[in-house]
Image (cartoon, rainbow, N blue to C red):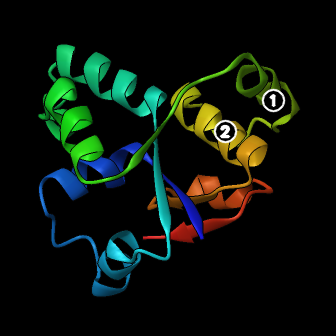
Amino acid sequence: MNYLVDTNVLIWMSMQSSRLSEEITGILESPDNTIWFSAISILEVAIKQSLKKADFNVDPSRLRVALIAEGYHELPVTGAHAVRVLDLPLIHRDPFDRLLVAQALCEDLIVMTADHAIADYPVQNLRV
């Protein structure tokens, strides 16, 4: 399976958070799965860290390097992803999450997320 991990889950992964169940950890560690993270998530962490948001106390550069070292795949943002946002209903007002949904739709990925609003989009998702 191919999963696109949302920003909050990426942060929890970096902190080895107890918020990640054994099932989710198993999916992330399984060689049968391909785990993707979006460049937009790294941007979101960078912006929110610069704004001193408490939940984003992660160095975006170190996070990216660590994800790549763990064998996760980085998904760049393309023009096709940006255009796909136009097709999405305005369920979620967060532009980062809307772009993640658009990427998942374009690339046929399952979004791994704890965000309830993402489940309202016509995208495959796995709730964390």
Q: Residue at x 59, y 39 (%)?
A: 100
Q: Residue at x 49, y 77 (%)?
A: 32
Left or right for 15, reference 64: left
Left or right for 47, reference 4: left
Q: Residue at x 27, y 72 (%)?
A: 20
| Quadrant assignment for the C terminus | bottom left
Residue 11 point in image, percent of width and height: 24, 47
User: Which of the two residues, 101 or 66, is positioned nearer the viewer here?
Assistant: 66
Q: Amino acid at mark 2?
A: Gln
> CA–CA distance between discs 2 and 1?
8 Å
Residue 33 vertical position relative to residue 66 in the rendered view, above or below: below
Name the disc covering residue 103, or none: 2
Q: Residue at x 49, y 56 (%)?
A: 115
Secondary structure at numbered mark 2: helix
Name the disc covering residue 58, or none: none
Residue 107 point in image, percent of width and height: 72, 45
Secondary structure at numbered mark 1: helix
Could you tell me how many numbered marks the image carries?
2
Residue density around tag 1, few if under 14, some if 14–19, many if 20 or more, within 10 Å: some
User: Which of the two residues, 66 or 94, is positioned nearer the viewer here?
Assistant: 66
Residue density around tag 2, few if under 14, some if 14–19, many if 20 or more, within 10 Å: many
The residue that disc 1 covers is 84
- Occupied quadrant, residue 25: bottom left
Left or right for 57, reference 11: left
Left or right for 79, reference 2: right
User: Which of the two residues, 120 or 14, is positioned nearer the viewer here?
Assistant: 14
Residue 119 point in image, percent of width and height: 65, 61
